[in-house]
Image (tube, rainbow, N blue to C red):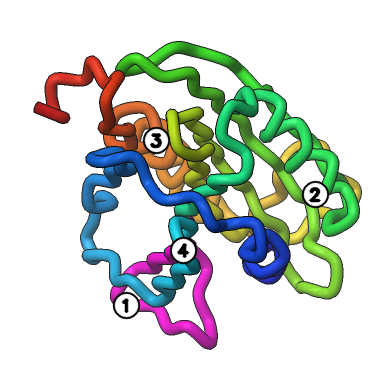
């Protein structure tokens, strides 16, 4: 899915000419460790950005976990649920055994948000599946998207996840619980309309 996200960023940078509203910025608290997470990609074109983080004990060449954040100035005003539905449709071409949950719309800190999950039984051309947790936020200047990808054992038929042992299943459940909690509690937007006290 990382390749698809980079391709989306590259394709949309031509339209990324708007300047950011003073003070509007996406906030991501440090992802829970241990280990700590490290920034491996930090691209920007005009007002548009694309960033990736992975655990410090993993490498760019071989990682199983990634946290991606990006913005789309050209999609400001688009409802985050609409954005996620489009992402889910695009994911169908990258996955065998695809299931989706959401999008679920909400209002947080003065902004419209949406959550969703993608359960990819097997990523095409890869020996693994991936579970992706999304949060999208509609700001005044851009639409913001944060996703947490977790690689899981391949199950091209989809449906329930398949694990080699109990420990692997427990670790996956912990990763999913952490990802859900992180997106809800530790990802937010600060700007002119923000009501989140952390923005003051």
Q: Is residue 140 left or right of residue 11?
A: left
What residue range appears in magenta? 49-68
In whole angstroms, how far apart are the C-alphas of marks 2 and 1? 28 Å
For disc 4, the marked residue is 46
Task: Give the percent coordinates (x, y) of residue 63.
Answer: 50, 75
For disc 1, the marked residue is 57
Instruction: In this rendered view, identify the residue nearer to me: 171 or 166.
Output: 171
* Residue appearing at x 28%, y 52% in the figure: 31
Of the 4 image quadrants, the one containing the N terminus is bottom right
Earlier sequence position, callout 4 versus callout 1: 4
Is residue 97 positioned above or below 79 on the image?
below
Element type at mark 2 = helix
* Residue appearing at x 33%, y 43% in the figure: 26
Dot 1 surroundings within 10 Å: few (below 14), some, or many (20 or more)? few
Earlier sequence position, callout 2 versus callout 3: 2
| Quadrant housing residue 154 | bottom right
* Residue 33 in view (yes/no): yes
In whole angstroms, how far apart are the C-alphas of marks 4 and 3? 26 Å
Element type at mark 4 = loop
Dot 2 surroundings within 10 Å: few (below 14), some, or many (20 or more)? many
In whole angstroms, how far apart are the C-alphas of marks 3 and 1? 22 Å
For disc 3, the marked residue is 183
Label 3 vs label 1, nearer the camera:
3
Is mark 2 in CB contact (under 8 Å) with mark 3? no
Task: Give the percent coordinates (x, y) of residue 37.
Answer: 28, 65
Mark seen at residue 91 = 2
């Amino acid at each position: 899915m990382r390749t698809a996200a980079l391709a989306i960023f590259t394709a949309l940078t031509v339209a990324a000419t708007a300047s950011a509203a003073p003070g509007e910025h996406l906030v991501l608290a440090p992802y829970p460790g241990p280990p700590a997470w490290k920034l491996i990609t930090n691209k920007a074109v005009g007002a548009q950005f694309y960033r990736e983080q992975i655990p410090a004990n993993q490498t760019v060449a071989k990682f199983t976990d990634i946290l991606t954040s990006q913005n789309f100035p050209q999609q400001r005003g688009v409802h985050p649920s609409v954005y996620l539905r489009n992402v889910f449709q695009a994911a169908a071409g990258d996955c065998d055994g695809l299931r989706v949950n959401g999008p679920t719309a909400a209002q947080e800190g003065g902004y419209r948000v949406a959550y969703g999950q993608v359960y990819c039984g097997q990523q095409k051309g890869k020996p693994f599946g991936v579970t992706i947790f999304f949060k999208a936020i509609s700001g005044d200047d851009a639409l913001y998207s944060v996703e947490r990808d977790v690689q899981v054992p391949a199950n091209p038929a989809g449906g329930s996840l398949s694990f080699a042992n109990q420990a692997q299943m427990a670790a996956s459940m912990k990763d999913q619980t952490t990802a859900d909690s992180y997106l809800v509690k530790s990802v937010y937007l600060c700007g002119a309309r923000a009501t989140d006290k952390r923005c003051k």
